Amino acid sequence: MKKISWIFLVILIIWGCSGGSRGTGGLVIEGSVLTTTGNPVTNAKVTSLNTGDSSTTNQAGNFVIDTDRFSGEPGFIVEADSFEVQSSGGNVPDSARVISVKIIVDVNDEPTATQEVEIKQTSSSSSSSASSSSQSSSSSSSTSSSSSSSSSSSSSNSSSSSSSSNSSSSSSSSNSSSSSSSSDSSISSSSASMEVRVEGRIESLLGSTLTVRGTTFTVNGDTDFGEFDSLSDFAVGQDVKVRGVRKNNLLIATRVRLK
């Protein structure tokens, strides 16, 4: 019996150590690794450059890393059988709890990668929901107590209890609405924080747009061209580094530089 117990303990230890390295928690990274043609990259090891924790992509190219909280620009190393690339971009605030990362790998002669980052959940929205739930529970308890008291008192006390119950219910509704507004604001703010970086040759220049490695950017008056004055100073075939921000369905170039 003692020998069987030892074997069971060893199995538990091995099982607890498998499946990649994991941090102590605080931030969940949900991601996917795809090729430029949209095919999933399977059985690839994805390692966070910020914390060192890693995971392996499944048959759909998806991975999850439960890691320590960090802030700033997230970076990753993707290691597959035929290539190894590094990607970075976006920004993770201190309040982030769940982020979504999409890594696009160009597996041509010189493999490169770009990534998009979306903040899916922050601590502010979680605390707002918890506060709303607590306030709703407190309001319900107060209403029940008032109703019980009113049934054993005179009609005048019953009228007063009803007024108190309506006031409490109105306050709960207001707090719930405020919490919902705060949560929506958090999601709206996070969805606007996606950043895209692409390096490679300019494939086309049309009006106020340029295309690099299949990704089309739109330039505007705020775009920084470095040593050049405008997009017209560039030419098709030049090697450039482009950084942009996705706003709704448009990818706006914030900076264009020669490599």
Image: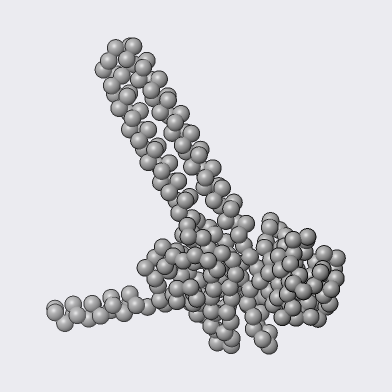
| Residue 172 placement (x, y as % from top left) | 43, 33
From what the image shows, is residue 91 above or below residue 182? below
State the residue in front, 102 or 5.
102
Residue 85: give x, y in percent of width and height.
58, 82
Relative horizontal placement of residue 39, taking residue 210 as reference (left or right): left
Image-based side of 225 in relation to 52, left or right: right
Outermost top residue: 155
Q: Is residue 115 visible?
A: yes
Is residue 59 visible in the rendered structure shown here?
no
Name the residue at 80% across, 72% down: 228
Q: Quadrant of residue 154?
A: top left
Extreme front residue here? 227
Taking the spot 39% from the left edge, 25% from the top edge, the residue there is 165
Is the residue 44 above or below the residue 144 in the image? below
Closer-to-camera residue (20/216)? 216
Q: Quadrant of the C terminus?
A: bottom right
Q: Residue at x 57, y 84 (%)?
A: 84
Q: How many marks?
A: 0
Please report the residue visible at 33 percent of the width from the left and 75 percent of the height from the top.
Answer: 16
Quick one: which residue is furthest to the left in this view? 1
Provide residue 141's location: percent of width, then percent of height.
33, 33
Between residues 50 and 80, which one lies in front from this camera angle?
50
- Work out whether residue 157 or residue 90 is closer to the camera in this orientation and state it: 90
Question: Which corner quadrant holds the N terminus?
Answer: bottom left
Residue 252 drawn at (x, y percent): 72, 62
Q: Is residue 109 above or below residue 114?
A: below
Left or right: 196 with respect to 222? left
